[in-house]
């Protein structure tokens, strides 16, 4: 999905999972 931004979405994986998904 977002390999180059894995560390970027990992920090917002708290409640932004539906945002980047």
Image: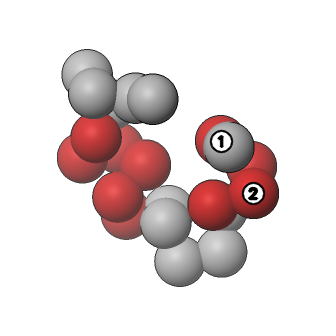
Badge 1 marks a residue whose secondary structure is: helix
Above or below, 16 against 6 in this view is: below
Q: How far, Cα to Cα, is label 1 from label 2? A: 6 Å
Place residue 21 in its image quadrant. Answer: top right
- Residue at left offset 65%, top offset 41%: 20
Q: How is the image coloured?
A: secondary structure
Badge 1: few (under 14), some or many (20 or more) residues near its Cα, within 10 Å? few
Q: In this image, 17 relative to 18: left or right?
A: left
Furthest residue in direction front, as rendered: 1
Residue of label 2:
18
Asked whether the beta carbons under mark 1 and mark 2 sit within 8 Å of each other, the answer is no
Q: Give residue 8's position: percent from left, percent from top.
A: 35, 44
Residue of label 1:
20
Badge 2 marks a residue whose secondary structure is: helix
- Residue at left offset 25%, top offset 22%: 4
Q: Which mark is residue 3?
A: none
Q: In this image, 7 relative to 1: left or right?
A: left
Badge 2: few (under 14), some or many (20 or more) residues near its Cα, within 10 Å? few
- Residue at left offset 75%, top offset 57%: 18
Furthest residue in direction right, as rendered: 18
């Amino acid at each position: 999905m977002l390999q180059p931004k894995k560390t970027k979405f990992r920090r917002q994986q708290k409640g932004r999972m539906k945002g980047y998904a």
